[in-house]
Image (spheres, rainbow, N blue to C red):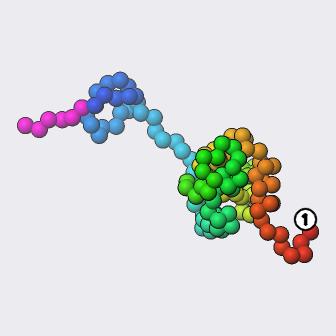
Amino acid sequence: MVSTLLKSCAYCGGIHKRGQRCASKPAATKQTTYIDRFRWSRAWKNKRAHIADRDKHLCQVCLRNLYNTQMQYNFTDLEVHHIEPIANAWDKRLEDDNLISLCRYHHELAEKGTIPAKELKNIILESTPQVFGEKS
């Protein structure tokens, strides 16, 4: 005799066979956007690697002991942040002076605006060596 496993349903409150899809469960409706397609592109992957190399694979905010830093030389959970969001500044999506390496914690703070964009821009300017003969 084979027994069928049952489970309670979070969507309708009923009981279904395990693996059966409930008709009350909403269908996934995530649409792929132009920003998603950009984030999957080779150009972005190459630029992201370049920025991580430029920033020595360290969170630039942690390195400066700002905003509740737990570890100064933080290279874990590193992400590259767009200072001006892609949706607002499409033309700057691959510009070095709009990108900075941050740990996940500081990236979330930057996304919320807790870390001002102007401060992140200043960090990039102070850490990027000036090309000889270039006027600032």
Q: Is residue 79 visible?
A: no
Q: Is residue 95 left or right of residue 80?
A: right
Q: Amino acid at mark 1?
A: Ser
Instruction: Please name the residue shown 69% across and 49% down the image.
Output: 65
Residue 81 location, quadrant: bottom right
Mark 1 secondary-structure assignment: loop
Identify residue for label 1: 136
Instruction: Please name the residue shown 55% across and 54% down the image.
Output: 77
Instruction: Name, please, the residue furthest toward the right.
Output: 135
Rendering coords of residue 16 (x, y %): 28, 31
> Is residue 101 magenta-colored?
no
Q: Residues within 10 Å of mark 1 (few under 14, many from 20)?
A: few
Q: Is residue 53 visible?
A: yes
Instruction: Name, please, the residue furthest toward the bottom.
Output: 132
What is the quadrant of the N terminus in the image? Answer: top left
Name the chief secondary structure element in magenta.
loop
* Residue 21 versus residue 79 in the image, above or below: above
User: What span is in magenta?
Assistant: 1-6
Instruction: Please name the residue shown 60% across and 51% down the image.
Output: 71
Rendering coords of residue 48 (x, y %): 63, 63
Rendering coords of residue 4 (x, y %): 18, 35
* Residue 68 versus residue 24 in the image, above or below: below
Q: Is residue 22 left or right of residue 119?
A: left
Front-most of residues 32 and 59: 59
Residue 43 location, quadrant: bottom right
Question: How many marks on residues?
Answer: 1
Rendering coords of residue 102 (x, y %): 65, 53
> Is residue 2 magenta-colored?
yes
Instruction: Please name the residue shown 60% across and 55% down the image.
Output: 74
